[in-house]
């Protein structure tokens, strides 16, 4: 097993790094918020104080950061990864960001002879903890094969979507769909409750009917229906509403460039913008259910 540098130890990054430790990798960790690295240090990771230190003598660098701006700073900044990493390291960015930033980082890495892949994930915190994530990878065949050797210790399904940037495009399409599905699931459950149905009974009915979908099956947004869902834990993330708003925005940006029609995605994006403006941006994205509840008469 080789040495991995892991940068960004939030809701997703920390359990992903934990799985690499369990698999036997030597793991060096860094987060701009020092506290985030302490738990991993206690589990055997080496906590580093800078990007320069964390990428020193590693085979692979994995980043799991909030958005494109963070990725640009961490890779391309004056003190960023590309300034310090060795030429034979493989760089993997698993954040969900715009494909243009992924291509820019890929190009600048390539110019220095360094391999880069974008590898955003699906599966949420539960998938990160259980090492069952889906990785959607963009990069050359050769880099994909190398990345797969590490990613398979954190995920179950690893797809090669195409060249650098394609992983992000695949992920953006998925999350456009997820935002729409979550909005629709909240809407249908709230309609049933307003008309006297028990949300557990209604959820079971829809799970065996044509309304079945991922949000309903694994992430029910109505409190008390599903014990382990964020809805039953005061909507603690999970996947924050502000990150869903970011992802739906990425979908709309991509649609503007390709002149694609995305009326459902635009509606879901506006619902989340409204929901976040009401102070819910740090709550799990399934808290959109509360928006529907607040619009009901009783
Ligand atoms: P998070 O906000 O919990 O974690 C991000 C971490 O990055 C934080 O610990 C933060 O301190 C750190 N960070 C920010 N800037 C940094 C910098 N300059 N240097 C080092 N560390 C820095 O977010 P998350 O939920 O873990 O999500 C990470 C990415 O994964 C996002 O792009 C998100 O859209 C995507 N994602 C999240 C989920 C989910 O369910 N949470 C699912 C799939 C994809």
Image (cartoon, helix red, strand yellow):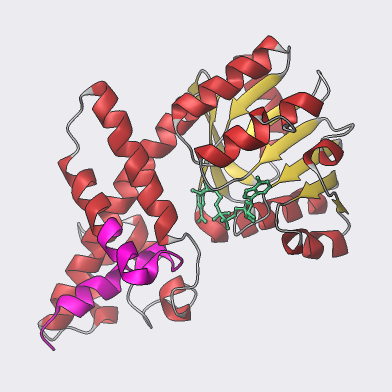
Residue drawn at (22%, 78%), measured in percent from left and top? Answer: 293
Residue 142: image quadrant is top right
Q: Which residues are magenta?
A: 272-298
The answer to whether residue 46 is left or right of residue 157 is right
Residue in the foreground of this view, choosing between 122 and 255: 255
The answer to whether residue 101 is left or right of residue 191 is right
x then y, percent, for residue 183? 25, 60
Residue drawn at (70%, 52%), measured in percent from left and top? Answer: 32
Residue 57: image quadrant is top right
Is residue 212 visible to us here? no
x then y, percent, for residue 41? 85, 59
The answer to whether residue 118 is left or right of residue 52 is left
Residue drawn at (22%, 84%), measured in percent from left and top? Answer: 198
The answer to whether residue 242 is left or right of residue 40 is left
x then y, percent, for residue 280? 38, 69
Q: Main secondary structure of the magenta part?
A: helix
x then y, percent, for residue 92? 65, 32
Residue in the foreground of this view, choosing between 130 and 277: 277
Q: Quadrant of the N terminus?
A: top right
Q: Is residue 285 magenta?
A: yes
Is residue 45 visible to us here? yes
Up-down: is 169 above or below 201?
Answer: above
Q: Is residue 99 magenta?
A: no
Residue drawn at (52%, 21%), measured in percent from left and top? Answer: 103
Q: How many marks?
A: 0
Q: Quadrant of the C terminus?
A: bottom left
Residue 86: image quadrant is top right
In the displayed orientation, state which residue is furthest to the bottom.
Answer: 298
Up-down: is 234 above or below 265?
Answer: below
């Amino acid at each position: 097993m080789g040495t991995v540098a892991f940068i960004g130890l939030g809701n997703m990054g920390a359990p992903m790094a934990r799985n690499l430790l369990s698999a036997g990798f030597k793991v060096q960790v860094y987060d701009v918020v020092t506290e985030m690295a302490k738990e991993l240090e206690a589990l055997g990771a080496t906590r580093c104080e800078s990007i320069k230190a964390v990428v020193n003598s590693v085979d692979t660098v994995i980043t799991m950061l909030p958005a494109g701006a963070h990725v640009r700073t961490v890779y391309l900044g004056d003190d960023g990864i590309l300034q310090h990493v060795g030429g034979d390291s493989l760089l993997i960015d698993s954040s969900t960001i715009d494909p243009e930033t992924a291509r820019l980082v890929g190009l600048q890495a390539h110019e220095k002879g360094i391999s880069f892949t974008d590898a955003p994930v699906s599966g949420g915190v539960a998938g990160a903890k259980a090492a069952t994530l889906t990785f959607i990878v963009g990069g050359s065949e050769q880099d994909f094969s190398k990345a797969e050797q590490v990613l398979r210790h954190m995920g179950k399904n690893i797809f090669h979507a195409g060249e650098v940037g394609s992983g992000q495009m695949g992920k953006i399409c998925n999350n456009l769909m997820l935002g729409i599905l979550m909005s629709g699931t909240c809407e249908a459950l709230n309609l049933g409750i307003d008309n006297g149905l028990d949300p557990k009974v209604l959820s079971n009915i829809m799970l065996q009917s044509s309304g079945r979908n991922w949000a309903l099956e694994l992430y029910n947004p109505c409190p008390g229906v599903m014990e382990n869902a964020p809805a039953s834990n005061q909507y603690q993330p999970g996947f924050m509403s502000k990150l869903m708003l970011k992802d739906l925005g990425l979908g709309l940006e991509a649609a503007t460039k390709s002149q694609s029609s995305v009326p459902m995605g635009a509606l879901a994006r506006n619902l989340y913008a409204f929901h976040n403006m009401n102070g819910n941006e740090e709550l799990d994205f399934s808290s959109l259910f509360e928006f529907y509840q607040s619009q009901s008469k009783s």
